[in-house]
Amino acid sequence: MKNKLRKFTAVMAVSAMMISAIPAVPYSNFSMTAGAEHTHTLEHFPAKEPTCTESGAKFEYWHCTDCDKYFRTEDCNNSQITYYDCVIPRTEHTTESIYYSPLRENVRCKECGKITGFSLHHFTEDGECEDCGFSVDEEYNLINDDIILDESLDEFNTEAKLEDDGYELDIENKTLILGNVYINGSLVLPADGTIDTIVIADGAKPIIADDIDIFNDDENSPSLTITGKGTLLTEEIYNNSINAGMLTVTGGAEVIAETIMWNSGTVQVTDNGRINFSTGDDMSIIIASKITMDNMSEIEIARSTLINSSDCSGLEEYVPDGYTIYNMEDDAYLILPENFFDENGNIDESQFTEENLLNGENIILKRRYADGIGEHLAGHSLSLDGNIGVNFYMELDKKTIADENAYMQFTLPDDKKSEVKVSEARTEIIDGNLYYIFSCSVSAKNTFDKITAQMITSAGAGETYTYSVIDYLMNIDSLIENNYDDENYIEKLGKSMQCYYMTAVIYFDGNMDKLFDWSEDYTGEIISDEDREEVENGLKEDLEEYLSPVDVDTLSGYEKEPVLNLPEGVEYYGSSLLLKSDTFVRHYFKVASGTDTTIFTGKKNGYYYIDSASIPAGKLGEVQTTKVGTGSVEYSPLNYVSTVLDSESADDNLKNICKALYLYDNSAKDYQNYINK
């Protein structure tokens, strides 16, 4: 039972929060620079005679003293300079192993920086490469050799276990399971189909330094499926058969490779699979007879990726805006920016410089509008600028943007619906991409409840998305990792928000049912009735410990009565604090007969009231001036908090939510000061 309590409280103990932060979105945007970026100051390099190519063309070599790039001119008298990767003959490089990667030891020239060769790491017994210093992390099981699975499996350790050796063989299911294993060589699979599936253990990152090889001179070769929620890193996946089967990346698996050569077979990416060609030092290549994807999967390619396939038609709908598939000779394709083409649609050959093709960022192929109505959810954020808002960042196609009937429909926890038209959505450009931001406000007590969002257009209804404030908080760890925060402001803000939301649920609902419902949904673990009381007590103890430093003395300075300047016939009665999607103060008044009542917001229990403006976290201690006809009331939310904590009759749950609100306000203020430095 103690372990269950620890697990439950660990899930509830959210550690971080960041205001108005959007997670990484799945598309890169970049620009290309064709030709020289400035006027180069050239000198002969390295003062050698012009060289001749086999075709007879002569080249003269130059070096720019400003930017340290190398160039060449054709026939020596051509004024047009062309960027050239490296002009030093291979035999003249001065090399050393000073650059390395998880896959291999790389050798580069100290003079020009060009990588001139590579080899597998030469590991010592302690897992460190004796040449370049790369070290296999302690979590990896190092196999400093090839793994060869022949038909009889004679040379394979069939007794290997995942937890001990980093891999395991399930012959009955034709499966090889890989954990955090580093194979410093090749993984050779049998061509007879004895092993046709590689399963990556959940969260594992196996490395195969050389290649995954199905080498078969026969006409037919089996298919290979790579699946599992992990990442496999290798240099190449190779199948040399005349009639290769199908290579499938599926089930959430990510394959990072420099080359896939699947000869005449089909490469398909499905069910949240991902192929990533972004790690190559030079041009990446994918060779197959056909390449297919489904709506939920991705292929990330380098700008220099060559696709050699007789059928790339299935990729066209996944190519991002601004790019096109260019059909070269012999069924070879390049995915190129549209600015590579002239106004007549013909290729502009001047764009084919090595600088443009080899030194670009990557392109991710993923159909953004999978539901067919022209929308895609790219990410979420929270806004705390006066209310608690959940923001949905949407990418929209031109047809949806132009549709005057298009809107985002939100269904709130109480089944109420709200709509935000596309024309009314806020827009923001992030990394060159335009996002339409649709916001939905929720109250503190509903932060554990799901919001449902759905885009409605003239073409129909889109995909249904569900999200909650607590969902965002539970996936915020990456923001801590990517932000330098030596004072833990992000963590403190997240902790205070979590406690504020918990106390709000307890105060407004009178129980912890929502917390348990959410936790069971999030973790899949059901807390039994006999364990529930102990878990509740544990959570209450944690809350009490966290809130204990706050008392009426902590609020010293906020115990002031409101400053009143009221018109004739209006008498101040009292104030309350409303914690809906907005945080604001409601002031109540007794009104004499004959007094103009149109100046008030409403009437409740015989008293007229006026609501203050919405007050953002971090500013709850600032005095708000609320107009009352020709007069006013000056008051702050923390004045109310001080009054509650000083009251002997106030409910403990009310005091707890007031304490939590004070801590939340303080941490939000500290965080804002931190990011505004």
Image (cartoon, rainbow, N blue to C red):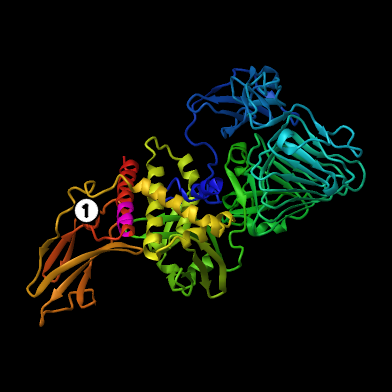
Q: Quadrant of the C terminus?
A: top left
Which residue has dot 1 on it?
622
Is residue 172 depicted above or below 416 in this figure? above
Q: Is residue 455 visible?
A: yes
Task: From the viewer's side, name the closer residue of 276 and 3.
Answer: 3
State the residue at coordinates (33%, 50%): 664
Q: Is residue 323 left or right of residue 164?
A: left
Q: Could you tell me what secondary structure mostly forms the magenta stretch?
A: helix
Q: Quick one: 161 or 68, which is closer to the camera?
A: 161
Q: Quadrant of residue 352?
A: top right
| The quadrant where residue 512 appears | bottom left
Of 377 and 251, which appears nearest the observer?
251
| Position of residue 430 measured from the top left corner of the image (x, y, whole percent) | 46, 51
Region rendered in magenta: 654-660
The image position of residue 389, as x and y in percent, is 40, 60
Query: Against 488, is 90 above or below?
Result: above
